[in-house]
Image: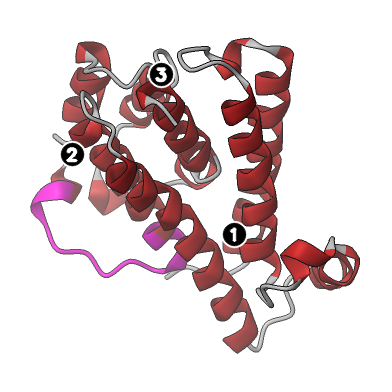
Amino acid sequence: MGQAQRHQAVFFALRRLQAPLSDITMPEEWDVDPSAVEALLRQGAARLDGEPNDAFQQALDRLGEAPLFASEVDPQIAEYFQLEAISGWMLLSEALGEMSEAQTDTIVVRARELADYLDGYLHETLMVVLGEEDRERYLVDVAEPLRAYGLGYFATRNLEVEGRCHEAILTAADGTNVLASATGRELVALCDDYSRELVAVLSAFPRD
């Protein structure tokens, strides 16, 4: 992948982690302005060429002014996903201008690790979380190349969506904004569907 292609791959990975940021209320003591989160997500999707982006950096700096970033926190699972998603955007900011393979992989792998973490959490919990039968059915019916990894639902589903995103990016010419195409819009919707599934499960766990 070229620089712009790697930026788009990272964007899709972060898009799969977006709903926990936008759809789950953060703790009051974090004092995070929801409009700052909205601005970050909007600017993060505005230009995907891998080059430094002042508007995106300003949105990230504004979010970083929240007291959250000057204190120690002991996050519950939903909050852990929120913090990891924000950290992913920070890593992207650091990568812009270079967008090396290693920097790209770090963020893409973060989405994989969080998916696997949630599968493990579901496996260990005594709670019955809505949709369990559907998740089990998906693993039974999923194509063999994905089933062969022996992963849980979210890790498998994330890899499926990631694979479709990367295929579209690699098929397009380097420098092409895949998101501006009909295929790109379908992939964004697919990432959003996955992200909302994360929220549905994360919201099922009680919060103190």
| Amino acid bearing label 1 | Ser
Identity, as a three-letter code, of the amino acid under mark 2: Ala
Left or right of 79 on screen, residue 55 = left
Sequence-first tag of 3 and 1: 3
- In the drawing, what numbered circle is on residue 66? 2
Residue at 63% x, 84% y: name it. Answer: 123
Q: Which residues are magenta?
A: 69-80
Residue under pointer 3 = 48
Splitting the image into 4 quarters, where does residue 58 fall?
Answer: top left
Q: Confirm or deny contact between disc 2 and disc 3 (CB under 8 A).
A: no
Image quadrant holding the C terminus, namely: bottom left
Q: Which quadrant is home to the N terminus?
A: top left
Estimate the x, y position of residue 119 in percent, counting from the top left.
Answer: 60, 73
Tell me the residue that label 1 is attached to.
Answer: 203
Name the residue nearer the viewer: 136 or 1: 1
Q: Say what secondary structure mark 3 lies in.
A: loop
Q: Secondary structure at mark 1?
A: loop
Q: What element does badge 2 sit on?
A: loop
Tell me where residue 132 appears, x and y as whole percent.
Answer: 80, 72
Q: Of residues 180 and 127, which is closer to you in this image?
A: 180
Mark 2 burial class by Cα count in 10 Å: few <14, some 14-19, many 20+: some
